[in-house]
Amino acid sequence: MIPAKFDYARPQSAEEAVRVLADAGPEAKVLAGGQSLLPILRLRLSFPELLVDVGALGALRGVREEGQELAVGALTTHHDMVHDPLVRAHAGLLARAAATIADPAVRHRGTLGGSLAHADPAGDLPAVCLAMDATMVALGPQGYRTIPAAEFFVDYLQTALRPDELLTEIRFPVLDGWGYHYEKFHRTAQAWAVVGVAAAVRRERNGGGIAEARVGLVNMGARPLRAHLTETALAGAEPTRETIGRAATMAAEGAHPPTDLSGSAEYREHLARVLTRRALLAAAGAA
Amino acid sequence: MSTGMTGRTEQAPVREVGRARTRKEDARLVTGQTTWTDNMTVPGLLHVAILRSPLAHARIERVDASPALEREGVVAVFTGADLAAGLGSLPCAWQVTEDMILPEHPAVAVDEVRYVGDPVAVVVARDRYAAADALEDVWVDYEPLPPVLDLEAALAEDAPLVHADKGSNRCYTWPLVSGDYETARGQADVVLRRRHHQQRLIPNAMEPRACVVVPVPSTGEYTLYSSTQIPHIVRIMMALTTGIPEQKLRVVAPDVGGGFGSKLQVYGEDAICLALARTLGQPVKWTESRSESYQAQHHGRGQIQDIELAATSDGRLLGMKADILADMGAYLMIITPGTPLLGAFMYPGIYKMDAYDFHCTGVFTTRTPTDAYRGAGRPEATFAIERTMDELAAELGLDPLELRRRNWIRHEEFPFTTVAGLTYDSGDYAAATDRATALFGYADLRAEQRARHANADPVRLGIGVSTYTEMCGLAPSRILGSLRYAAGGWEAASIRVLATGKVEVITGTSPHGQGHVTAWSQIAADVLGVPFEDVEVMHGDTRVAPQGMDTYGSRSLVIGGIAVHEAALKVVAKARKLAAHLLEASEDDLDFADGVFSVRGSPDARKTIQEVAFAAFAAHDLPEGMEPTLNAEHLLDPDNFSYPHGTHLCAVEVDTETGAVAIRSYVCVDDVGRVVNPMIVEGQVHGGVAQGIAQALYEEAVYDDAGNLVSGTMADYLVPAAPDLPDLVTDRTETPATSNPLGVKGVGEAGTIASTPAVVNAIMDALRPLGVRDVRMPCTPERIWRAVREAADSESSRKEDAS
Amino acid sequence: MVSPAKDQAPMPRASVARISVNVDGVDHRDEVEPRLLLVHYLRDTLGRTGTPIGCDTGNCGACTVDLDGATVKSCQVLAVQADGGRVTTIQGLAGPDGAWHPLQTAFHEQHALQCGYCTPGMIMAARDLLRETPDPTPEQVRDALEGNLCRCTGYQNIVRAVLAAAAELRRQGAPEPRGQGVDVPQVSGQEAPA
Ligand SMILES: Cc1cc2nc3c(=O)[nH]c(=O)nc-3n(C[C@H](O)[C@H](O)[C@H](O)COP(=O)(O)OP(=O)(O)OC[C@H]3O[C@@H](n4cnc5c(N)ncnc54)[C@H](O)[C@@H]3O)c2cc1C
Ligand code: FES
Ligand code: FES
């Protein structure tokens, strides 16, 4: 119910934040929206010595269009993403998935950066970033570096971020002209995904065959996954119920989903196949 | 049930009773001007935090509290041994059989912990943060003992014991046998056996518990503020447990944020806080967190039910057998052993049969104790009969409603004494069912269901029926006595008529959301002929309402509300006497209507009840022997239970690919007799049905093999939110109860009792054509998916065998 | 005592923080532990006990308040994070003359509460919805309340009440504007694009 004691800092710039983190060492934690961190602190599952509140870093909140990329600040909230016209126009999958997270009050506070840095395999946005081939931008004592989504998620609640790095921005290649769909299966409205599937499909011009399909899987392992076999099977295929259905049967290949309160591994594999089919049919406009 | 001493005011027009009055309670609640126990603060208040066992079963080898004492802000730390001297065992009021095992239940464990959450040590600090911190610095060494989790395995000869000194995990076996079941079974064409599992549930009142104790050391007086449904019972039990003389102990239930049985309890934390306030001479407060409450508040349900129905081939029931294993948890709390037995009388439901054979065995396990949760025993019973009736209908190839029609008690057969020995006073099962099927569009949905089946639609439609009744209004004292319950089931009401003619109603019920302030105002206003606004209702403080049996078991209206009615009649009788005296008329010549006494035949000779009230107060001119007051009180002990009933119909769509269930429509037609406030009644039905649906689809207290509560936070235990529940179509039929002068029946639990089997029956109705025989509650998507897959597998292996 | 107040050179870390928060129109200045939850600040420090606590995981919504024009679960926010902010609770909803907010009236009239423990959070969440979506469908109301649990009512009358209040607010003219401090485009609450 009540967090253990910690110290607090509220830096006024990203550079300062990184300096504070570096000075404090591994017992410091970034506080963004707090929607994952605070429950953990309240249940006393974690005992950081210092929270570095990045809430004052207004520059890290907001969305910019940069050529063929959309740059979304790490502090952009779920609510912002749902409503942002640029996100809706060029990264609709992100908006769609963000809208399924928790509830409006949590969405007002929870941030994209926090969701990704927290790397909960049941979180909706990591798999979306993976499916969209996003790139993470991190600032550390040595300056900025970029990390492709495929390398960012390392293990359960673990990312490639170092303790003294701050995730500042996430860059999404714009998916103009793609069809997309986010299929989340959860037991109650507010609950996390048992399994989620983020699908994006680019058709050949004039409504032809599938040029490229991407499938990101939520809660199918210790980290978010891509359904590579399904994606490969669809490249160049016709978007019929049959081909998509067949490709979807491979969605869980190689995944090692958890068994927990909300479902067994076996059930999750089954769900991944069914939801992948549904998500792809919707994304390909073949539903 | 009439008081017999007054002329009834039959002639008074019914103005308030039956009206959808908005609630007097709301003004404070919608503006945040509340008095939740945790809101309270007093000078010198100390905060209590409780260290709880992380193990399901272990011997306590050593508790070292000294590091905690060193911490800033910490005032004291106590172990179980420290507190044992001043605190007796926590009470169980229901010795259900002579040989029932009743283990010692210390508020803080001394040598052994028996469930995850069993208190081990108590920290007192100057603020709640310091108290929480200090828990980190109390060190306990445990020697693990084997957990006891499986109800059947626990009864084996060599099973590890929850209470080693008691020699067995069998708490009791309680029989109820009527007629000759073996003969009935022998005559039957069909004998259908089913096993049902009632999962453990966590009641989840939205307000976690809290208590504040304010002592007056110089006089030895204590005030306990507690978020309880039962301040009166808590007072008695705390006096016995702590040794504080009853007259020195005042118990107050301030605003209480829901209960559903979870606050119908005499909890150790209240006793601990009284003991701490006594030792420290300072006020103390304890507030639980939600996760803590999941371990520390009693759970509900937790039964395995083996049910057998014996019937003829044309669907006439001959007999029923019910063998129940009931999970007691680690200790017996206030009515732990009796809770499953409250259902014992209801397994036969609304049906006629010749023989009934019921046995319930209570079993100790190393889990949080169980006790009453909304419905307490009756939801389990109703589920068992209504689920099994649907199975029987399927077995016999009958429509489930038709099977029920062939067996239910007909309207003209009331009052009817059931095979379980209860006398149902009134009811009209056909009327409620006809209304429900019409609202539901039963025939159309059946047609759609057939079409979907024919097309092998992956989303199946199912229709679930539940024609329930229940016994509530707990309870006639003589029956409670015969069931060996320690106390009675009466209720108290008193009415004070103030000098200005305004009225105070004092009730022994203790509402926490049920709207008694509004409903009692309506009842009193009608009888007294005073405006609704002129009535103030007081409750929940043993100084204000010294007598009462509190609120649970849908008892408040049918006992407490009727007591208000009877007390008001006594006031009118007194007023009549005085009015007659003032008007120099005979009492028999007075009419009383709309609050005015008038002399029959001379309409100008009249006195309002307010004028009479003032005359009583002034006391200048009273009839011989009359005391200067119109005040009256009434203690009412009911003759019988109350038997609301109704028909609930549920249509679900089941996605056979994912196992997801969506409730498409839900119709409830309830018969709760006459209605005092239809808006409140509808609200009770809504909330009750929601909790029943939650049992069917979402909720379960899940333990792992080590006895840890894995669904241990609100993130894991799925309380449904608004998008997870359907809009209900509600309607009523009205068959007045004959057991009380207002004709009312209880409504607090009916929705919960009715709805769980309606939902599960609907799921089974959707899946039965696929070969599915059963799905355990909660009917999670995975369980449904597995059931469908297993049915398909056995279907295909059957085909292979055949070829 | 160190303090990270904004007008000073920011200190690297502090174990006590000085905050200033406006709650229901009143300015408060306090020194708090950084770990103090906003809901405890409201309840224990300021005595604004209208906002209750129902859980420790951010699930129940009982503690919902408005912070700078958007709802938050006040158990999921540190008091220091509200520094410089403006908090509105259930106790600050009524007009200066004590007149109830239409949502308060509607909850009363539609019997949308029983024990009332969830009510402050429900009303705050519903108010947030109606600012973005003045004419919601019943489904939108249910979705907007997905983070607010009620154990008593089954939600049906809550949905009714929110729809009634929405109609009343529309009848009265402009629904309340979003407060300052949040830069949210005024997109009506439609679904994200498919
Ligand atoms: C009731 C409830 C239900 C929820 N349901 C869902 C759901 O269904 N799906 C879902 O995806 N999420 C869900 N969430 C979580 C929510 O999305 C969180 O907002 C999100 O996971 C974390 O974002 P945050 O900004 O709140 O991060 P915080 O809680 O502030 O931080 C989370 C972690 O990330 C680190 N961190 C944060 N920002 C940065 C950064 N910029 N650089 C480096 N490290 C950083 C922190 O140190 C911390 O370890 C739910 C939360 C709640 C309370
Ligand atoms: S108390 Fe804040 S969400 Fe439950
Ligand atoms: S009214 Fe009791 S929790 Fe909602």
Image (cartoon, helix red, strand yellow):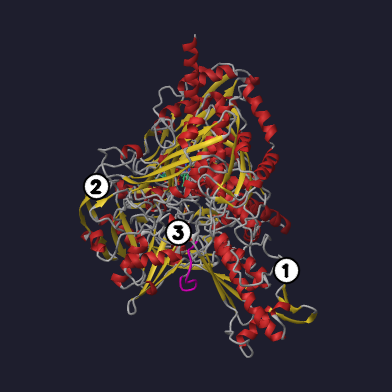
- Look at the picture and state if B148 lies above or below B524: above
Q: Which residue is mark 2?
A: B164
Same chain for marks 3 and 1?
no
Label 3 CA crowd tier, 10 Å (few <14, some 14–19, many 20+):
many
Same subunit, tags 2 and 1: yes
Q: Quadrant of ligand 3?
A: bottom right
In front here: B41 or A200?
B41
What chain does mark 1 sit on? B
Q: Nearer the viewer, residue B667 or B38?
A: B667
Q: Could you give the CA–CA distance between mark 2 and mark 1, rounded to whole angstroms?
A: 66 Å
Tags 2 and 1 touching, CB below 8 Å? no
Whole-percent x, y for residue B715 in the image: 44, 45
Q: On the image, numbered disc 3 is attached to which residue?
A: C38
- The numbered dot on residue B11 is 1
- Residue A225 on the magenta span: no
Residue at the outermost left position? B61
Q: Is residue B376 left or right of residue B669?
A: left
Residue B508 location (% of width, % of height): 51, 67
For marks 2 and 1 on the same chain, the one whose residue lies earlier in the sequence: 1
Is residue B624 depicted above or below C100 in this figure? below
Q: Is residue A94 visible?
A: no
Mark 2 or mark 1, which is nearer to you? 1
Which stretch did the figure color magenta?
Answer: B542-550
Instruction: Please tell me which residue lies in front, B321 or C119.
Output: B321
